[in-house]
Image (cartoon, rainbow, N blue to C red):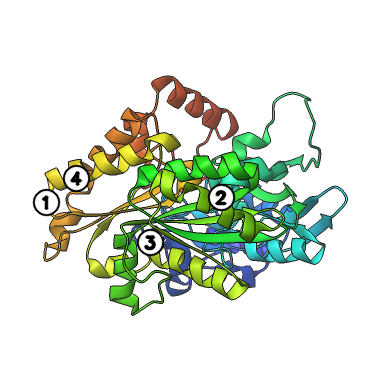
Amino acid sequence: MSQNVGPSAPQAEIAAIVGAAHVLHDPEVTRSYRLDARGLFLGDAACVVRPGSTAETAQVVALCAARGWPVVPQGGNTGMVGGGVPMGGAQTVILSTERLRTIRSVDPDEMVAVVDAGVTLADLQRAAEAEGCHFPLSLGSQESCRIGGNISTNAGGIHVLRYGNTRDLVLGLEVVLPDGRIWNGLRRLRKDNTGYALRHLFIGAEGTLGVVTAAALKLFARPGEIGTAFVALPDPATAVALMRGLRQRLGESLTAFELIPRIALDFGIRYIGPIREPFARPYPWHVLVDVTLPEAAARLEQALAEMVEPLGLLDAVIAQSEGQRTALWHLREIGAGGHQHRAGAIIKHDISVPIGKVPTMIARGTARVTAELPGTRVVAFGHLGDGNLHYNLVQPEGHDPSDFRGRTGAMNRIIHDLVVELGGSISAEHGIGLLKRDELGHYADPVELDLMRRIKDAIDPAGLMNPGKILPPA
């Protein structure tokens, strides 16, 4: 961490804009801003600045542009790929949006919310609920992640199946550009064909093109009755067939369809303790299903009953109360793997493939990584409804963790080669950041990379906005 002092240091000049209390420079205080959520990357920075308004944000960015100081926009710093870690050197300024917390409006007639970038996802959900509306983005980190970060990473979550990614929920943006100008694109319209849809440049750009300071977001009617089922299956192919069958019987009422392997629950039982499972015996695969429609539980039960024999479903339980529904979703959280690191070193992948290719991805991927290193434990779980798998590789029992981590490059190549072979993406919902920057350089179409570099050069010619992220060196 830089120890700059005196009137020429970034923190002194920036303090004149936002006040000294909102410029942090003690290394111990700023460490949590400089370290990514997974503890993989620790960066260097002159200070952390916390502007209190869009105007202050613009003044800070303009000052940094004039001085040549790199700027790293940061929301809740909950990202999984190191996108918010400062990599521009000791003069870097981390610009935190945590004080931009105003919910400007929630309009139940237009079904639009306009909020500052530092509003947490959970606070937006609660504000929408208070007005009889629903904001459908749902993430495990929703109490701490912030709307600006959700937009900058195009966050996904468990309801993409019905509502889409964050990109599909954004109507307009307010953005401070790398030179300090403010682009006021806070349009609330569903239809607007006045040229390029500029908001899409900043959604998923991970702060490399500007600082999102506010957003106009789509709201929806509160969900009606929700039916939840936990279904035991012999294999992922049956899960795909089950989803198709539910859609045929229940239309577009599916809001979540989560795939959970037995090994994920076993890790939970081992490291968290005994859990109350809905079945008397273990099964190899499960799906957790949510549907939203009138008489949801009864109709879901009927649909499942019709498919037990044709598909070979092994067992199923339907939640009969909100408490039971919460308990079933708790099984999904256990399977999501926050404790898997206790089993040893992990190599994680956030991938997507066409839904029909998910069984192939799991089977071929398992065969290839175990051929590379026998005993590697594959924990493939995630949002089957949109083809997004979290494909975690856990070291063999008793294997040296350092050796396993040293195989990360080889394992990445195996998994990502297969993903591309199947027509998928090496990053489904976590972004590229620093972690996957070189992988993007390896797999992306050269024309696509050239277009992205041209956009970056046009908007940020000095390369000061979140440098070192997404785009590999030319």
Q: Which mark is residue 38?
A: 3
| Amino acid at dot 1 | Pro
Quarter containing the C terminus: top left
Q: Which residue is mark 1?
A: 374
What is the secondary structure assignment of the residue under circle 3? loop
Residue 319 location, quadrant? bottom right
Q: Which mark is residue 369?
A: 4
| Amino acid at dot 3 | Arg
Precedes in sequence: disc 3 or disc 2: 3
Precedes in sequence: disc 2 or disc 4: 2
Vertically, is 170 above or below 269?
above
Vertically, is 202 above or below 305?
above
CA–CA distance in space, label 4 to label 3: 23 Å
CA–CA distance in space, label 4 to label 1: 8 Å
| Amino acid at dot 4 | Val
- 117 with respect to 405 (left or right): right
Precedes in sequence: disc 4 or disc 1: 4
